[in-house]
Amino acid sequence: MSRVEAETPRVRLSDYAPPDFLVDRVALRFRLDPGATRVTARIAFRPNPDRRGAPAPRDLLLDGRNLVLHAARIDGAAVPPEALRQGPEGLRVAAAWLPEGDFVWEAETEVAPEANTALEGLYISRGMYCTQCEAQGFRKITFYPDRPDVMAPFRVRIEGDAPVLLSNGNLLGSGPGWAEWEDPFPKPSYLFALVAGDLRAVEDRFKTRSGRDVLLQIWVRPGDEPRCGYAMDALKRAMAWDETEYGREYDLDRFMIVVVDDFNAGAMENKGLNVFNSRYVLASPDTATDSDYKSIEAIVAHEYFHNWTGNRITCRDWFQLCLKEGLTVFRDQQFSSDQRGAGVKRIEDVIRLRATQFREDASPLAHPVRPEEYIEINNFYTATVYEKGAEVIGMLRRIVGPETYARALDLYFDRHDGQACTIEDWLRVFEDASGRDLTQFARWYSQAGTPHVTARGTWEGGLFTLALAQSTAPTAGQPRKAPLLIPVACALFDPETGAPLTETVLELSRERQDFTWDLPARPVVSLLRGFSAPVILSGPAGGNGGAFLLAHETDPFSKWQAGRSLALGILAKTSADPGAAPDPDYLAALARVAEDPALAPDYRALLLDLPSLEEAIAHLVESGRIPDPLALHHARRRLEAAIADSLGPRLRHLYDAHGLDGPYSPDAAAAGHRALRGCALALITAQDAEAALAATHFAAADNMTERMAALSLLVGRNRAEAALAAFRAAWRDDRLVLDKWFAVQAAHSPPETAVATVEALTRDPDFDWQNPNRFRALIGTFANANLAAFHAADGAGYRLLADWLIRLDPVNPQTTARMTSAFATWRSFDAGRQALIRGELRRLGARPGLSRDTGEMVERLLREADG
Ligand code: B3K
Ligand code: ZN
């Protein structure tokens, strides 16, 4: 069956073939109407010279879904019906009807944006027209070779009643009811965008270093203008940073961001016209938390950075997604690290990597950074492609060094500007810049699963030997794994003085490898400093678990990891044995760091923060045990209380010392004080006698960060009734804040009552479940952030999620499919829970008319168990 005829084709990397036809230019005309928008597309095609040898005849295959075709012409002449074959996936124009060389295809199609609840293609969000084309939404707008290796300049005319009509590129002209745009840079269709509505612009300007004056606009609904300041500031900082750090300048006369309320993703990097989920732009001290501000900065930068890594140089096919996403995440991490401090940023990135990507790698959803097949590509916008993709680049930079990395990137931009590229192109640039053979390193892109590295140290006769070994467990479709090239940053410490004796990066390339040093005494070893590779480290010499390292390590990540490992060990032990006392060395070390003025407040907050339940579960699973989420939840509570006991009055001192006077500022330093104070508050109120402080804190808070910190504690301690009512009354009309009101209850309600609370909230008149932000705030937060409740032994949590996925799937397959991943870890639990989850997955999978997005996810989730 051909691509356009098959219902659910499985697409394989190995089947890649270049397009038969290239596009020289595209002209689109939209006549907007909610129920019947007319799209006229004029597309200049040219046979691809690279396909000259390919077997004839070459039909013209155009992707297209849910389109009504009104007219089709080639070089101005109507195409007869017998020349066309339309299927659910597109249109085939028989080769016999095509001219020999270049030709212009013209089609008039009709779509119904108001009926488009999937939020892919052209849709309407609260009265505003909006598009989302990545990965394959353009085919829901017009017939087109909707693949990223077909790049063309676009000209767009929009006609409609809306006062503001926007598309990519530079504005050619506008008048009442129309506007014309031109994007001179050849781009793939997934970067096309159109927005129309009653919008207002917040404007600023940026002068590039070569002197180009760029108009910056953030388009919002009337009334939201005062909440764009931070995003605009972040944008200007990102533009300047990309010039100084990567030598990349902006290339159009204007850069626009549009804010929409209904959006499946966080944001989208359409050329010159980024579209953002409102939660990643709109912020004021009263409505956004420090963590919201941090995300806004990172995502605004990420989408802007795509202009070079993604748009100017794009992906040849969707298997190469990490080429743009891994690199752009790496770049946004570097940016945030420069803006806010490297140590804390690295730790936050590792926490996220472990919670999302390690979790995925340990599940039936494991796939390589460059996947090899898919049914629905939207299912592969994953932590593996994004976060592990970024880690792979970080390792590459470590291996070749920062100077060579910079030269390789210059070469990448010079060599590939305007092209659609592959991972092979990317790695070749590094080979050329460094002179190294990266054949083994390339396995990071093709081999799924998180490697386990074990370490053993022996000291004998003045010789210290570190024996490292690596292995990666089988994953779906990959029963046997080859050794990877793993950079292991390492330091050896003098056990007496605590001073580092040596600091180096070991390259572990074989299954087992010894490294030796002449040393007069046995050193203390710290491995994986800076988290130099995305691996799970264990073993006596490599556990980084000692109070010694918590005291003496100078690498911020490894110092933090030392404390984290101790905490995880305690949780594992005390969840199985509730009477066991936490390790006094750990408590003593924590008391020291809590008060160490040499450590920045945000870093101290991370040191004091306990591992999440998710992390504690993963730790047990990694060491071959079956986790009991509820027991771990209680163990975590007991450990909080024990820390509070042990720190005693120091906590109150921290709480008082880190209160800030004056107006709220979202900068990292101020946020650090709030984070440390929030940590102290959580520990203080872990003691029943002090619980009232949370209510006092809530009442006194003059910003959303402190308000939410207190509210989550009150909800967790079942004392939130009054605060929740006050919060809701104050923010009734603010959608983003109301999302927080739903989310805080979903995340923090105690396990005994959470399912009932969430069920009651689904009946709340403000539970607008078709809005992805609201659905994620309640259902997604419950399933991903309240694990003790979600994993309730009677299966009520699982049933609740499955019921809502069944309801959402026909409306919004993408958001549904994504949320099935809450079930990903199901095989880690006991037989009872496994049977319950399997039952829910089968119930979901058996729904008549299930979307291909969700169908593929359910199939992958069940595959190992059901063969
Ligand atoms: N490239 C978009 C993600 C699109 C999601 C498609 N399902 C945002 C980003 O990564 O920058
Ligand atoms: Zn991206």
Image (cartoon, rainbow, N blue to C red):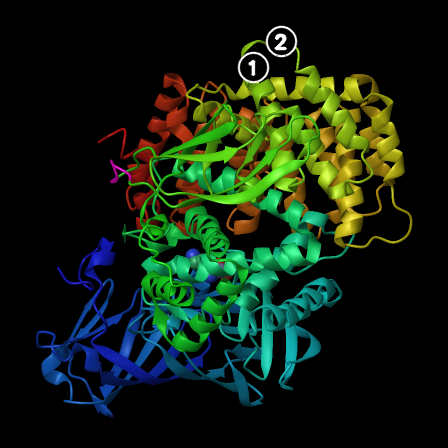
Residue bearing the label numbered 1: 573
Residue 83 is situated, as x and y percent measured from the top left of the image, at 13, 79
For marks 1 and 2, the one nearer the N-term is 1
What SS does tag 1 mark? Answer: helix
Q: In the rendered view, does 862 fall on the left or right side of 567?
A: left
Residue at disc 1, CB closer than 8 Å to ligand 1: no
Q: How far apart are marks 1 and 2 (CA)?
A: 7 Å
Residue type, numbered disc 1: Lys
Residue at image coords 35%, 74%: 110
Give the quadrant of the C terminus: top left
- Mark yes or no: residue 399 visible: yes
Residue 782 is situated, as x and y percent measured from the top left of the image, at 55, 34
Residue at image coords 71%, 57%: 283
Instruction: Please name whichever residue, 352 or 593, is drawn nearer the observer in this view of the structure.
Output: 593
What SS does tag 2 mark? Answer: loop
Q: In the rendered view, does 543 fall on the left or right side of 311?
A: right
Residue at image coords 15%, 63%: 2
Instruction: Please name whichever residue, 48 or 274, is drawn nearer the observer in this view of the structure.
Output: 48
Q: Magenta segment, which residues?
A: 477-481
The answer to whether residue 587 is above or below residue 267 is: above
- Considering every residue shown, the one lying at the far top of the view is 579
Instruction: Please name whichever residue, 551 or 296, is drawn nearer the observer in this view of the structure.
Output: 551
Residue type, numbered disc 2: Ala
Task: Kindly indicate the quadrant of the structure image that contains residue 574.
Answer: top right
In contact (CB < 8 Å): disc 1 and disc 2? yes
Residue bearing the label numbered 2: 580
